[in-house]
Amino acid sequence: MVSLFFSGGRVYNNYMRNSQTPGNGGDRMSDIQERPGTSRVARTAIFAALAAVLGLAGIYIPPLSVLTSFLWLLPLIVITLKEGLRGGLLSLTAAAVLIGLVASPLPALFLTLEYGGLALVYGMAFRRGYPLHRVLVAGVAVAVAGTILVFLLSMAVTGVGFGEITRQLDDMSRWTMDVYEQTGLTDLMLERGISREELADMVDSMAVLAISILPGIVLIGSVFTALMALLISRAILERLKIPVPEKLPPFSRWRMDWRLIWGFMLGLVLILAGSSLDLELVSIAGRNLVTVFAFIFGVAGFSIMVYFWQKAPRGIVRILMLVIGVAYFQITLYLLVFTGMFDLFFDYRRRYENIGGKSDGSNSQQ
């Protein structure tokens, strides 16, 4: 798949070189190549076809869909970068039509709505040379909007609403209890003083929690999609010798903006207000905010852990860090979240370097 994209990139570069070659008087082909409109249409068609092929590969070969979901954006990003928003829209429309004709209209529509806007935004951001953090913020916003739109549209098309999702989770709760019974886990819980009714309540509570934070999980997936699309597109555009914004700092130096703490605090306030005033929707909104920002702080905490892992001496110290992290995995997750949160104010890596630790020469991401 990647080699297919690079072959398309070589075709594009050949078109660019041909369009810049002076004509030879009576040579009609040279005269045609000098016309900007003709070469633009050809490039748009080539990259639309390339995007369609990559999109279709993900539809017909499901295991490849994780990869092609990002790769099919790349031709659209390149054509938007070089030809502007109009060229990107034409390529996106043509690719969607081709996918719809070969596969079916619905997958083409979902693929276009979920990822098409991301390609256009990244292409225009690269074209105008926006700073990397602005590119990522815009990409996250568009990815979230596209994911929500596809989610709502799919529920409308399939007729599956939140009530049906709730019923399915109830069935899953009963299935989980049956598995506990068959495997003997229920008897083990009884030995620990947990009755069957209490265990059933715990399973039901987990199902309710899963439903309530579903929007937050969708948002986290959108953030991941936008970030991965940015990293992959930058890497391939660099291979094609196309100027792109500055690189992300090493992962061990990632640091979040301190203002993110307000989003986490708002989530806590909404949870408390919803519980006090018996407003379930307010509580659900708060839980989703806390979930999203906890994930962000967890990523920041993991970055700090990677930093100190790199600074730790090889051998027993690293082995102990790994064993403790795996053995107390749940505690480690909470520790990562709180470490990332408090790093907004204490900047542990800078403090470590100020007291004698060696810097790796890169700057923190502010």
Image: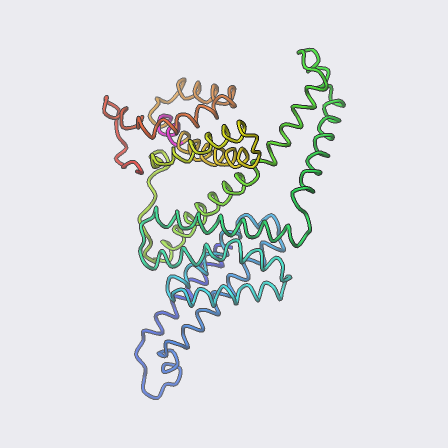
Magenta highlight: main SS: helix
Q: Is residue 354 above or below residue 239?
A: above
Q: Is residue 254 visible?
A: no
Residue 264 located left or right of residue 350: right
Percent position (x, y) of residue 345? 31, 28
Find residue 26 and report its image quarter.
bottom left
Q: Which image quarter: residue 128?
A: bottom left
Viewer-side residue, 310 vs 350: 350
Q: Is residue 150 shown left or right of residue 351?
A: right
Percent position of residue 68, x then y: 53, 52
Q: Residue at x 57, y 30 (%)?
A: 278
Q: Position of residue 263 (x, y in %)?
A: 42, 36
User: Which of the 4 image quarters holds residue 209?
Assistant: top right
Count the marks.
0
Magenta segment: 303-309
Residue for point 57% across, 39% down? 214
Q: Is residue 314 above or below residue 28?
A: above
| Magenta-span inclusion, residue 111 | no
Q: Residue at x 52, y 37 (%)?
A: 285
Of residues 309 and 192, the one drawn nearer to the viewer in this rendering: 192
Residue at (47%, 24%) from the top-left corner? 334
Give the position of the C terminus as an image quadrant: top left
Percent of width and height locating residue 346? 30, 26
